[in-house]
Amino acid sequence: MTSGQAGSAGPSAVLRRALLAWGLGDVALGRRWAGIAWLVAEILAVAALVYLFTGLADTSGYLIPFLAGVLFLTAWAVQAALAYQAALREGAGRYLGGSRAAAASMAWLTVPLLLWGTGFWLVSGTASSPAAALDRFETSWPALASGGSLDPGIETYGGFSASARTALGTLQRLCAQGSLSSDCSTSARNLLRDVRIAVVPADADEATASVTVVSFERRPSRFLGIFSATELVPVPRQTLLTIHLRALPAPLPGGLELGARRWRIVGAAAA
């Protein structure tokens, strides 16, 4: 594309193209090599983002891929704005009143920003802490009642499923005896209504969790320190399962270490 041909593309058209892919705005202005450089940069940035997300999204280093994604979107906006400014300079005096259209075009970047900001937190951090690893366990635990299996990503040894199945069997017996909530037999998930999991950190890289059946007692309390009231307080009744967790190194693909850790269940014992 020649400079003469570039003159036919107004700033708004250049901006729209730049928002489609990095460098298309520069190509529309006749700056072919600048456009190719931006396009190559986008490909490399996407590859780096996928690399970081794959290796770190579920670890204690989950903020690294998140911030990398924000940086990617920022670079996307910057290259589009630079192309738009260049188009304004080349067409000085010929294009007036396009600021509103430009602002509306730039506003479309809020869509990928919203998708990234929302979607990332739905899938990230699933092994970033003991609580996150235990949440995955609690979510898949009821599946054992129907012959299913636990989430394969939460443990590092093969004996945990047997311990979890034994603890679930204890819950089923308590339900049959009428010791749990009245609807505990409706579904396997209802068995967990009277279960609480408490995490006790041993050090920075190890923790122990107790899975306990509780009952609820009504005890007197004070509202605003003045009015008499009552509250339901969970009282531990029986420990079902003791779980040991450890934070393991989580290198990126290829072995690159950034200090991230991935919490895994490394041992368990049914009571």
Image (spheres, rainbow, N blue to C red):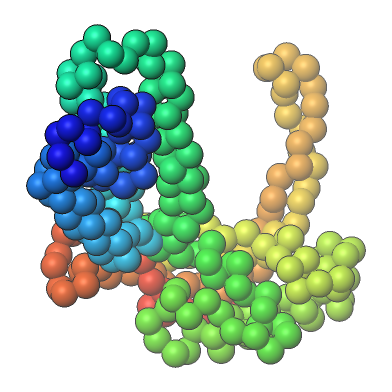
Which residue extends farthest left? 33
Query: What residue is shown at x 14% (from left), y 34% (from top)?
Result: 3
Going 53% across and 58% down the picture, which residue do you hit? 198
Frontmost residue, 38 versus 205: 38
Query: With 116 as the anchor, is 213 left or right in this view?
Result: right
Expressed as whole percent of the image width and height from the top left, the position of residue 144 reads 66, 83
266 on left or right of 4: right
Q: Where residue 263 appears, x then y in whole percent?
A: 36, 66
Q: Residue at x 22, y 19 (%)?
A: 91
- Left or right of 221, for residue 111: left
Q: State the image coordinates of residue 169 (x, y, percent, origin top left).
A: 71, 83
Residue 81, above or below 119: above
Q: Quadrant of the C terminus?
A: bottom right
Across and down, in percent, residue 66 comes to 33, 47
Which of the 4 quarters of the picture holds residue 208? bottom left
Residue located at (51% from left, 73% from top): 242
Q: Is residue 98 above or below residue 70?
A: above
Quadrant position of the N terminus in the picture:
top left
Find residue 139 and report its image quarter: bottom right
- Nearer-the-camera pick, 257 or 13: 13
**Observer able to see residue 196:** yes
